[in-house]
Amino acid sequence: MQRRSFIRQSLLAIPAFYIGNSLLFASCRKKDDLKPGNWRGKVIVIGAGISGIYAAKQLMNLGIDVTILEASGITGGRIRGLEGFADFEIELGAEELHGKRSEWYNIVNGTPGVSFNEASSEEYFYIGNMLKSESAWAGNSILTQARTFESTARNYSGEDKTVLQQAIAQGIYPDGYEIINAYLGNEYGASNNVLSIKGIAEEDQLWESGDDNYTLKSGSYTNVLNHHYSDVINKVKLNHPVTQINYAGNQVTVTANGTDFVADRVIVTVPLAVLQSGTIQFSPQLPDAKRNAINKIGMGTGIKVILKFKDRFWAASTGTIIGGSKSPVYWTTGLGKSNTPLLTAFVMGDKAQYLSSLGNGATDILLAELDQMYGNNAASKAFSEAHIMDWGKEQYIRGAYSYAIVGGGVSQRRELAASIDNKIYFAGEATHTAGHNSTVHGALETAVRAVNEITMA
C-alpha cells in the first residue's frame, strides 16, 4: 500500500491499512531546509495548530517578533487527545505518522516518553453480510477486484472524474464499493462520489515521505507539542478569533477579539473550511484566483467515535474492520498499548454528515452495525460508553482535512499557497503542493515554506 491517511495521522486515522518532485511553492522537506535570510520585521501567525506553532517556532529562533492568535481556547488544532476515557491518551485527531522521511517523524521519534507501536494485526472485511479475516477471504473475487482498483487508482491518468464514476466505468462489483470507499474516499477525507481519482493520483505520485506508517505505543502528540514547543504555546493569545485582515497599507492590520494587531507580515494557517466559510474578511478582497482556489479544494465533515466495551467480542488479532456501510473503518484503538476493549469508528464524507446529524444517536447506529457484523447483539451487550469527536462541529476548524475534487488538483493548492503583495502568506496542510497535503508532516513543511518566503523576500 502506498502512502498515508489522516486516518491515523494526518489530521485523523487507521492501523496498518493505510498506506516526486517538488513544484513551485513546494514545501521544504526537513528543518535544515530553513533559509534564515536577512529580513527582520514583525509577523502575526493566525492559528495555533501544528503549522502555526511550527512557523512561530522558526521565526522566534531567527529572532523575529511574533504574535500568535488562536480563535479557540486551546492550542494544537487537529492534534487533540482524550484523557481519562481509557488508561492511555486517545488521539481524537492526528493519529498515524506517515513515513520516516519527514521532520515530523524526527520530532516525534526524538520526544522523551514517546515510542512507536510495533504490534502486528490482521484486517477483517465485511462482505455479503459476512465478516472474515483477510486470509479467510483469500481468492474472493469481490475483495480482489476492490483492492486491485484501489492500487491502480493511485496511478490513474485519464479524464478527471470521481472515484465512484471510475468504479462504475470499470464494472466493479457493487458489493466492493464499501471497501473502495474505505481505502480511497474515506481515507482521503471524503466519499467516492466527490473525491477526484485524478487528483489523488496526482498527489500520490508526488509523495516522498515513505510508505511505512506508525502509531504511538506510549505518549501522545500533545506530549510532543508540549515538549518541543512550550515556549511558543505560552505566547499564544487564545480566544482571539480573527474577523478581518486589512493589508491595504504598508503594514497589515489583523482584527481579533475586538483588538487590532499590526505587523509587517501575516501567516494565515487556519483550516481550509474556515477560509471557505468567509468568517475572516480580507481588505482588499482576495484576488479572484485565490478565492477560486479556496473553493476548488474539498474539505468536509470527519468523525471519530470511540466505543468502549466491558468485554472484547472481536478476534484478538483484529487491527481493522473494513467495509461497513455506516463506518467504512473500525480499528482496535488500544492495539499494542492497552487491554481496554476499545474500537474507533473513523467516518468521513457523506457517512460522516449523516452521523453528525444524529448527534449522540450516532452511537446506536454504529452499535447496530457491529451487532450485524458479529451477531447475537455482541456489541450492544458489551457496550459501556462512547465519545464522539465531530470535527465538522468545531467552530474554528469545521471539518477533517482537505481533499481533491473534480476540477481542482495540485494547481489549486499552488494558488492557495501563493503569497499576496509580500504581506499575506498561507500555510497549513491544504496549501501543500507536493503530495503531503492532509497530513501533519505536510502542514509542518508548509510552515517552513511560508517562513522562507517571508525571510527571503
Image (tube, rainbow, N blue to C red):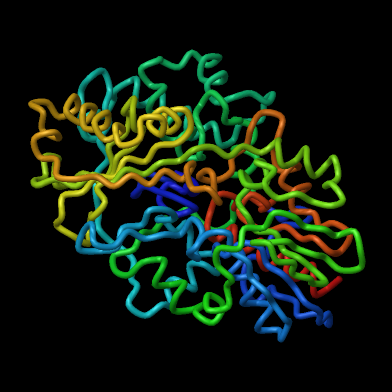
Q: How many marks?
A: 0
The residue under the point 67% across, 58% down is 242
Residue 444 visible in image = no
Residue 151 horizontal side relative to residue 424, left or right:
left
Residue 85 horizontal side relative to residue 410, left or right:
left
Height in image: 290 above or below 365? below
Residue 39 horizontal side relative to residue 104, left or right:
right
Height in image: 66 above or below 87? below
The x, y position of residue 106, in whole percent, is 49, 72
The x, y position of residue 432, in whole percent, is 66, 53
Task: Identify the image quadrant of residue 277.
Answer: top right
Quadrant including the N terminus: top left
Height in image: 3 above or below 104? above
Quadrant including the C terminus: bottom right
Residue 454 horizontal side relative to residue 226, left or right:
right
The x, y position of residue 4, in whole percent, is 48, 49
Residue 280 visible in image = yes
The residue under the point 45% across, 17% down is 172
The x, y position of residue 71, in whole percent, is 58, 59
Q: Residue furthest bottom?
A: 63
The residue under the point 59% across, 24% down is 162
Pick the residue in front: 104 or 351. 351
Task: Identify the image quadrant of residue 125.
Answer: top left
The residue under the point 63% across, 63% down is 445
Height in image: 413 above or below 256? above
Pick the residue in front: 264 or 289. 264
